[in-house]
Image: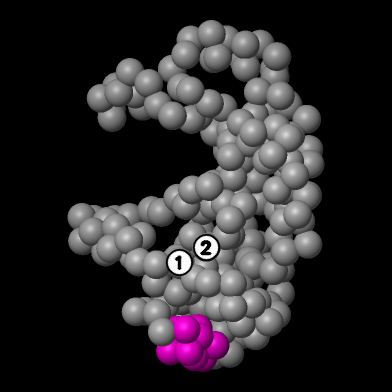
């Protein structure tokens, strides 16, 4: 139905929404869908670093989509191991939620508080300061450039609501990525937020 709606006979990759979905009738599903060749690769969307080590045990998984943004410190200690996995297994890493579902771009206090996040003033001040210090065009540019600059990430998934947003994001993708010094400045200075802030499934609303 989706292929018909987007007028395509084949898509690049089909992703399981949760890693747990892989293990439901795993063998029959993977064999059937690969045989149908409606997509080039099979992948899975995960929610925390530990899940990677579980899903790579399935040889058909070739794409892993992760939540990753400028505040997300959870992946730091796993990067070297992820790079090794990518090299050995040829797996692609795609990043989503680089704006934390749009929250990092919002200066409306209500947007933060209704999700139970009370560190918003500290976070917004830091984002503004870093945008100025590193000389990026906007907070959106800073957040996207940070994710784009990760050598272990192959693609960035961006959601848009209209053509204006699409065109704005295309312009941001054309800007230079960050250098190593800029990345270090960000990672050494960023506020240490609670993990529940980084996982929208735990937000109060």
Check the image and report above or below for 179 versus 1: below
Q: Which residues are magenta?
A: 125-134
Q: Calculate the distance from the C-alpha at mark 2 to the C-alpha at mark 1.
A: 5 Å
Determine whether label 2 and label 1 are within 8 Å by CB: yes
- Picture coordinates of residue 62, whole percent (x, y): 61, 31
Q: Residue furthest left?
A: 163
Where residue 180 sits in the image (x, y, percent)? 59, 72
User: Dot 1, crowdedness within 10 Å: few (<14), some or many (≥20)?
Assistant: some
Residue on which disc 1 sits: 177
Magenta highlight: main SS: helix
Vertical side of 182 occupied by 88: above or below: above
Question: Which disc is residue 149 wearing?
Answer: 2
Q: Quadrant of residue 51?
A: top right
Left or right: where 67 falls relative to 40: right
Q: Please, what secondary structure does the residue beneath circle 2 have?
A: loop
**Res 84 → quadrant:** top right
Q: Is residue 134 left or right of residue 90?
A: left
Instruction: Tell me residue 187's x, y (percent).
Output: 65, 77
**Residue plotted at (49% across, 71% down):** 178
Which residue is painted at 62% across and 52% down in the image? 152
Identify the residue at image location x=29%, y=58%: 170
């Amino acid at each position: 139905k989706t292929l018909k709606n987007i007028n395509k006979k084949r898509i690049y990759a089909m992703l399981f929404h949760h890693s747990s979905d892989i293990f439901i009738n795993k063998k029959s599903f993977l064999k059937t869908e690969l045989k149908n060749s409606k997509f080039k690769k099979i992948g899975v969307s995960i929610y925390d670093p530990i899940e990677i080590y579980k899903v790579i045990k399935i040889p058909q998984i070739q794409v892993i989509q992760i939540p990753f943004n400028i505040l997300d410190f959870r992946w730091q200690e796993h990067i070297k191991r992820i790079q090794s996995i990518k090299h050995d297994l040829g797996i692609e890493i795609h990043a989503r939620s680089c704006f934390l579902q749009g929250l990092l771009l919002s200066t409306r206090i209500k947007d933060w508080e209704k999700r139970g996040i009370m560190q918003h003033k500290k976070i917004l001040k830091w984002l503004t300061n870093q945008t100025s210090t590193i000389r990026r065009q906007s907070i959106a540019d800073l957040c996207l450039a940070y994710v784009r600059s990760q050598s272990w990430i192959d693609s960035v998934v961006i959601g848009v609501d209209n053509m204006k947003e699409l065109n704005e994001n295309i312009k941001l993708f054309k800007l230079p990525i960050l250098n190593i010094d800029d990345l270090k400045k960000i990672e050494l200075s960023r506020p240490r937020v609670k993990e529940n802030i980084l996982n929208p499934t735990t937000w109060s609303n």
